[in-house]
Image (cartoon, rainbow, N blue to C red):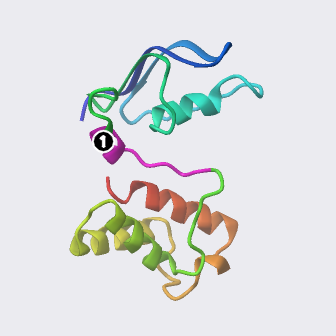
Amino acid sequence: MPDIAVRTQRLTRRFGNLTAVDAIDLQVAAGQFFGFLGPNGAGKSTTIKMLTGLLAPTGGSMNLLGLDFATHPVEVKRQIGVVPEGMGLLDRLTGSEYLHFVGRMYGLDRATTQRRANELLDFMQLADRPKTLIADYSHGMQKKLALAAAVIHG
């Protein structure tokens, strides 16, 4: 794994005459936690959408995990996971069923999906409720499950 997980150079996003993100240079080391703080309209969500491939920049470059996003978008997207604000969980499934669904969506084989799901449910302290539907999880438990789903392929 590269020493630098995220690097942007002059990353820019314009919407017509509005510049939402203006030439951001950013470097985040592997293993480092990083957050965006600022008032409404500062470009936080726009930057995150660009870094996750949901929105194309209008200028600059992004390098994630040693891969240039412009030339290797599919490979980059395979390496990242996202927990959206609304989480988007399928609440009529159990946590285990949901992780199996997500693992298979990422292209993991059944054995790997089973192993990773079990590891993550244990790590997130969700393994003791195997038959509980996500709809019956507390909000905190749902957040843990969403995070597990975001990293199951890693």
Say left or right for 27 vs 17.
left
> Does the magenta run of residues contain 17?
no
Say left or right for 3 vs 21.
left
Judging depth in this view, the residue of 11 and 95 nearest the camera is 11
Mark 1 surroundings within 10 Å by alpha-carbon count, few (fewer than 14), some (14 through 19), many (20 or more): few
Instruction: Give the amino acid at mark 1.
Output: Val
Asked whether the viewer can see residue 34, the reply is no
Query: Could you tell me which residue is drawn at 54 percent across and 35 percent down?
Result: 49
Q: Label 1, on which residue? A: 74
Asked whether the viewer can see residue 119, the reply is yes
Name the spot of residue 54 as percent of width and height, x first. 50, 39
Task: Report which quarter residue 38 is drawn in.
Answer: top right
Against 19, is 73 above or below?
below
Query: Could you tell me which residue is drawn at 33 percent across and 59 percent down?
Result: 106
> Does the magenta run of residues contain 81?
yes
Judging depth in this view, the residue of 128 and 79 nearest the camera is 79
Q: Quadrant of the N terminus?
A: top left
Magenta stretch in the rendered image: 74-84
| Residue that sits furthest to the bottom in the current view | 131
Against 134, is 102 above or below?
above
Against 151, is 95 above or below?
below
